[in-house]
Image (cartoon, rainbow, N blue to C red):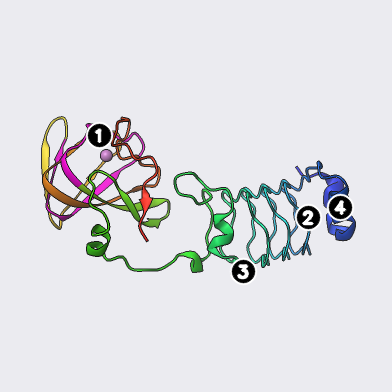
Amino acid sequence: MANAEHLDLIRRDLDTWNRLREADPGMVPDLSQSDLSKADLALANLSGALLNDANLVLANLRGADLRAADLTGANLVGARLLGVDLVGANLSGADLSTAEDLTQEDIDQTLGDERTALPEGLQKPPHWLGIRKVNLKAAFAKFSDHWQPRIVGDLHGVQVKIVKLLGEFVWHQHDDEDELFLVVKGQLLMRFRDREIRVDEGEFLIVPRGVEHQSVAERECEVLLVEPGTTVNTGNVRDERTVLQPERLD
Ligand code: NI
């Protein structure tokens, strides 16, 4: 719950608020779960503030200092955000679906999930979608190593990756992730403990979570993977081919 004094002061007298923050840098403003809808918070010093689950609908936050602020679950629909400083802020689950003033760069400076680099559950505005087409032939031409997946797209926490396979991979399973293998070129043999399935060019196969599998490619095979961003290529196994943070291809 918000600190009533903090809430009252920031609503009533922003100049005094900012002076107070300057005089007492150790103070941690607690505005969590507060209703600050339509509040004029332009140029407010809110660095390190607790704003989790705050209602900031239509608030004016232009030029506000939100460095390292906790904005977890905050509703920022319609908020004015031009020039805000979000370095190190936590935006997990925040609703920024109408944040026309923000750029992807502003968000890149916030705390992100270490694998997806985006705050978890963030409602992104459509203009960040970075719509582009990917030419698979050109993308595969950018690398020649095997078993090293590259990220080529993101959708709803799921990643599209491409990888070249040659030889036998390690037996592994993914406890929480389903994995789609689409063969773009060549032939993939997917071994399970009770059978094996050949996947030809233009075919795909989905390995459900919890099922042990081993990819085998007698000749080099190009595969497109669709799987949650948390998926590690070797699943529950760690070996020299484990890639915790795949490279992204532009
Ligand atoms: Ni796998």
Residue 197 is one of the magenta-drawn residues:
no
Q: Amino acid at mark 2?
A: Asn
Q: Amino acid at mark 4?
A: Asp
Q: Which residue is mark 4?
A: 8
Q: Residues within 10 Å of mark 2 (few under 14, many from 20)?
A: many
Residue 189 is one of the magenta-drawn residues:
yes
Q: Position of residue 175 (x, y in %)?
A: 34, 33
| Quadrant assignment, res 156 | bottom left
| Dot placed on the residue nearer the N-terminal end, 1 or 2 | 2
Q: Residues within 10 Å of mark 3 (few under 14, many from 20)?
A: some
Q: Position of residue 70 (x, y in %)?
A: 66, 47
- The image quadrant where one finds the C terminus is bottom left
| Dot placed on the residue nearer the N-terminal end, 1 or 3 | 3
Q: State yes or no: discs 1 and 2 in contact (Cβ < 8 Å).
A: no
Q: Which residue is mark 3?
A: 101
Q: Position of residue 26 (x, y in %)?
A: 81, 41
Q: Nearer the viewer, mark 4 or mark 2?
A: 2
Q: Which residue is mark 2?
A: 45
| Dot placed on the residue nearer the N-terminal end, 2 or 3 | 2
- Secondary element at tag 2: loop
Q: Is residue 170 left or right of residue 46?
A: left
Point 24% across, 58% down: residue: 140
Q: Is residue 96 visible?
A: no
| Dot placed on the residue nearer the N-terminal end, 3 or 4 | 4
Q: Amino acid at mark 1?
A: Val
Q: Mark 4 to mark 1: distance in Å?
A: 56 Å
Q: Mark 4 to mark 2: distance in Å?
A: 15 Å
- Secondary element at tag 3: loop
